[in-house]
Amino acid sequence: MRVIVGGIIQESNTFSKATSTIEDFRRNYYRVDEQLLAVQTEINELSGFNKAANEQGAELLGTVYTQTVSSGKISRASLNELKNQLYERVQRYLPCDGLLFAMHGAWVAEDEDDASGEILSELREMVGPVTPIVISLDSHANLTKKMVRSVTELLVTGHSRILISWRQDTKRLTCYSILCEGNAIRLSVL
Ligand SMILES: [Zn+2]
């Protein structure tokens, strides 16, 4: 199983007059290609993706995984640059069995309130209607119709150690409690 993996994480303060750029990402945490598959210096979603892939025997194909601190909206030029970096790599690996991305879900561009939705809808267009796209989000994500329509499954995690999963095919929302080391028990299905 070949899974394209990546992530773009930032929380935007829309009251801030400061504009964030791709340099903020590069200064904080910016990994590309096979760097995504190495042991990560931080405990982040990428570490979890790698652990799960090893357990399942899945091959991960690294694109771009980057995160930075909370800041102002990202400039259009930097958003386009990040998208180019990501899309060029996604194209390289298509066709694949699925895409797995950490998106956080609270990212705003200077001219687009739904920067995550913009990326996910473009990825959906790129891979076609069938290939699964699965994303993880933080518990305060600003969920939009564009995001939900673009993905196959979304996972919401948070400090409460509760994980909520929503699937496009069954329209099913499932709530899990994460016990430890990624072992989860299902609490309820809505
Ligand atoms: Zn957050």
Image (cartoon, helix red, strand yellow):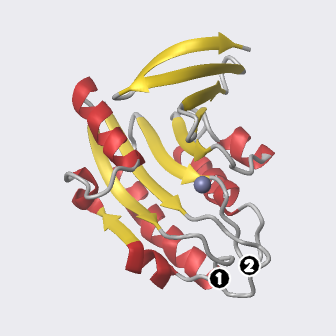
Q: Residues within 10 Å of mark 1 (few under 14, many from 20)?
A: some
Q: What x and y, as percent, mark residue 135? A: 54, 42
* Rendered-image quarter of ligand 1: bottom right
Assess whether mark 2 and mark 1 are in contact (beta carbons under 8 angstroms): yes
Three-letter code for the amino acid on which mark 1 is drawn: Ser
Task: Write down the residue under mark 2.
Answer: 110
Q: For the residue carrying disc 2, how many other residues have a C-alpha within 10 Å: few (<14), some (14-19), or many (20+)?
A: some
Specify which label sits upstream in the sequence, 1 or 2.
Answer: 1
Is the CB–ligand 1 distance for label 2 below 8 Å?
Answer: no
Q: Residue farthest to the bottom?
A: 18
Q: Is residue 33 above or below residue 139?
A: below
Instruction: Spot the residue most to the left.
Output: 38
- The answer to whether the residue bearing label 1 lies less than 8 angstroms from the nearest atom of ligand 1 is no
What number is the disc on residue 75? 1
Residue 115 shows up from this direction: yes
Which one is in front, 168 or 179?
179
Q: Residue at x 25, y 58 (%)?
A: 41
153 to 109, vertically: above or below = above
Q: In the image shown, does 182 or 155 lie closer to the viewer?
A: 182
- Identify residue type, mark 2: Glu
Could you say whether the residue bearing mark 2 is in a helix, strand or loop? loop
Q: Quadrant of residue 112?
A: bottom right
* Cα distance between the residues tagged 1 and 2: 5 Å
| Residue 49: quarter of image | top left
- SS class of the residue under badge 1? loop
The quarter of the rendered structure image containing the N terminus is: top left
| Residue ID at (59%, 75%) | 79
Residue found at x 36% / y 48%: 46
